Image: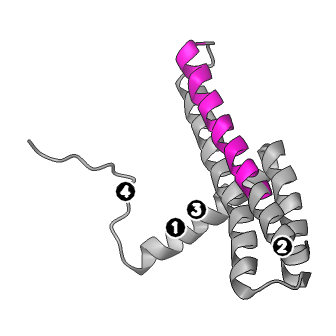
Amino acid sequence: MEHQTSEFKSKGGFKRILDASSYTVQGLAMAWRIEHAFRQEVLVCALGLIFAFVLPVSGFERLVLIGVLLLVLIVELINSAIEAIVDRISLERHPLSKNAKDFGSAAVGLTVLLAAITWGTVLYNRFA
């Protein structure tokens, strides 16, 4: 059985790196433009980033604080991609479509919870 590859799949090399960088910028710009939750999370993450650099914490703690903030954005982007795929397939209400969107939302919610617990733990251990 012959393996089929999408005509849109990149072949590699330096052009692939440039293309991937361009797709990243386009994806972030589109998410900023059309995803309200993403904009809110970026603003919260920007504030968190400032605090992470101002707080008297170790380098590792700073890395963890920033990492969980970026993880929230990453999972939000994946959730947005799931929603876009579901909507591309059909705008008709369907239990499986609802499940896919709810699962994505739950992933974001759990990631936000992880970030809150991480920040709370680091701050508690540092200042309590």
Residue beneath label 3, please? 23
Q: Name the kind of residue labelled 3 in the image.
A: Tyr
Residue beneath label 2, please? 49
Q: Sequence-wise, which precedes: disc 4 or disc 1?
A: 4
Task: Give the label, 1 or 2, closer to the camera.
Answer: 2
Question: How many residues crowd mark 4 within 10 Å: few (<14), some (14–19), many (20+)?
Answer: few
Q: CA distance from mark 4 to mark 1?
A: 11 Å
- Res 98 visible: yes
Q: Sequence-wise, which precedes: disc 1 or disc 2?
A: 1
Q: Name the kind of residue labelled 4 in the image.
A: Lys
Q: CA distance from mark 4 to mark 3?
A: 13 Å
Task: Give the label, 3 or 2, closer to the camera.
Answer: 2
Q: Quadrant of the C terminus?
A: bottom right
CB of mark 3 within 8 Å of CB of mark 1? yes
Give the magenta part as a residue range: 94-116
Label 2: which secondary element:
helix
Residue beneath label 4, please? 9
Q: Quadrant of residue 24?
A: bottom right
Label 4: which secondary element:
loop
Residue beneath label 1, please? 20
CB of mark 2 within 8 Å of CB of mark 4? no
